[in-house]
Image: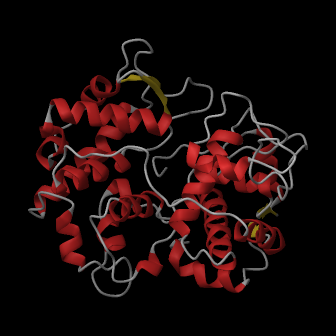
């Protein structure tokens, strides 16, 4: 069965309709509670915590096209997370991945060219992301290198030297029948996810940096990764109805490709519904909120349902949402979360993939 893309199911989710026998469904009642909470909050704009002022326009676009293509599983189960020190700061996960690539590109700007990507090796990636203290923690460097080679070779085949060529070919259109960015990105192996995680993330980055303005901004959906899956399963905005899938989640055993898509599609639909119902109508902005809260206050092992520890890594701009009238600082969603204070808590599903 050919899976539908996220955008094709968005209107149904916003309208409150879904297939009666879907293995994972949106809980619209809980989504409305979350939307109601958000209506009373000042939600920060979506943005990255790093800037690239030293890069040219085409270098910024190529930096993000490359970075997002390899962005997946920075905190793999049963393995230490990707981390290290850059410029006097200790970084983990996505922050380290981005910071280390920026440092490498500053030292050698050829890293940002499709010509380099077309012949990159796993050893190249090990070298780029190696930390002097923590060593080689980048998972599956050979697989990631294969994604980058495919990206570079196809860029060269089309005589595209930078990401802006995709924007020009699409005339700034995200989706639709004409040539559009989602279809162009899907030609690359790194971006052919049916739920469009990397594609939406890349398009959001290009918009947030001020480089690209789309003629159909309403088509910019939310990128769904494992942090969002874990958080929404715990919030209760999505429900698992399939007995086999539920058993796999509880046991921590691998799910099928179809089950992975079903979970992420339901989370995508829930987020789109909340975006619409809250009045925010900005899925990317909402994604940044959820992603930062879930990875800071609702990790696999540590949850801040009742209070945040002194070292809670929630970015400063989101802290006002975590401050409550009783003087406590805790997860911003603790008052509407269906699993707050409850054990055991679900984790994201186990699935080997390079989609996210």
- Is 312 rendered above or below residue 245? above
> In the current view of this chain or complex, which residue is farthest to the right?
342
- Is 242 rendered above or below residue 153? below
On the picture, is 198 further left or further right than 79?
left
Residue 277 image-quadrant placement:
bottom right
Residue 202 image-quadrant placement:
bottom left
Q: Position of residue 287 (x, y in %)?
A: 57, 60
Q: Position of residue 94 (x, y in %)?
A: 46, 39
On the picture, is 138 further left or further right than 241?
left
Q: In the picture, which quadrant includes the N terminus?
A: bottom right
Residue 27 visible in this rendered orientation of the protein: yes
- Is 348 rendered above or below residue 93? below
> In the current view of this chain or complex, which residue is farthest to the left?
159
Residue 224 visible in this rendered orientation of the protein: no
Task: Look at 77% across and 38% down and name the residue there.
Answer: 303
Residue 334 or 273: which is nearer the viewer?
334
Q: Position of residue 168 (x, y in %)?
A: 18, 74
Task: Look at 64% across and 67% down and name the residue there.
Answer: 271
Q: Position of residue 267 (x, y in %)?
A: 65, 63
How many numbered markers are drawn? 0
What sort of colour scheme is used for the picture? Answer: secondary structure
Residue 154 image-quadrant placement:
bottom left
Residue 47 or 29: which is nearer the viewer?
47
Residue 139 or 33: which is nearer the viewer?
33
Task: Look at 51% across and 77% down and name the residue there.
Answer: 7
Task: Look at 68% across and 69% down and name the residue there.
Answer: 270
Residue 330 or 28: which is nearer the viewer?
330
């Amino acid at each position: 069965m050919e899976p539908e893309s996220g955008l094709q199911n968005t209107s149904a989710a916003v309208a409150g309709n879904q297939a009666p026998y879907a293995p994972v469904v949106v809980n619209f009642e809980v989504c409305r509670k979350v939307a109601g909470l958000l209506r009373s909050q000042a939600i920060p704009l979506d943005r990255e915590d790093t800037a690239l002022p030293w890069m040219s326009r085409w270098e910024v676009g190529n930096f993000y096209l490359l970075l997002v293509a390899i962005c997946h599983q920075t905190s793999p189960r049963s393995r230490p997370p990707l981390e290290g020190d850059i410029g006097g700061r200790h970084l983990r996960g996505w922050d380290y991945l981005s910071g280390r690539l920026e440092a490498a590109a500053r030292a050698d700007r050829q890293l940002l060219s499709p010509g380099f990507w077309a012949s990159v090796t796993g050893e190249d990636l090990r070298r780029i992301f190696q930390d002097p203290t923590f060593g080689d923690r980048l998972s599956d460097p050979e697989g990631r290198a294969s994604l980058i080679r495919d990206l570079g070779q196809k860029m060269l085949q089309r005589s595209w030297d930078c990401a802006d060529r995709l924007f020009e070919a699409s005339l700034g259109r995200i989706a639709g029948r004409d040539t559009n960015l989602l279809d162009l990105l899907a030609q690359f192996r790194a971006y052919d996810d049916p739920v469009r995680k990397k594609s939406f993330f890349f398009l959001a980055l290009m918009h947030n940096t001020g480089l690209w303005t789309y003629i159909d901004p309403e088509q910019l959906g939310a990128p769904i990764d494992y942090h969002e899956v874990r958080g929404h399963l715990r919030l209760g905005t999505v429900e698992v109805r399939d007995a086999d899938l539920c058993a796999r989640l509880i046991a921590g055993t691998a799910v099928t490709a179809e089950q992975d898509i079903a979970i992420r599609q339901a989370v995508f639909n829930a987020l789109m519904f909340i975006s619409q119902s809250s009045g925010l109508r900005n899925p990317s902005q909402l994604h940044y909120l959820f992603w930062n809260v879930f990875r800071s206050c609702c990790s696999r092992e540590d949850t801040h349902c009742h209070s945040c520890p002194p070292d809670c890594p929630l970015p400063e701009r989101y802290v006002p949402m975590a401050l409550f009238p009783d003087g406590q600082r805790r997860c911003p969603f603790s008052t509407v979360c269906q699993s707050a204070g409850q054990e055991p808590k679900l984790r994201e599903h186990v699935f080997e993939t390079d989609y996210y």
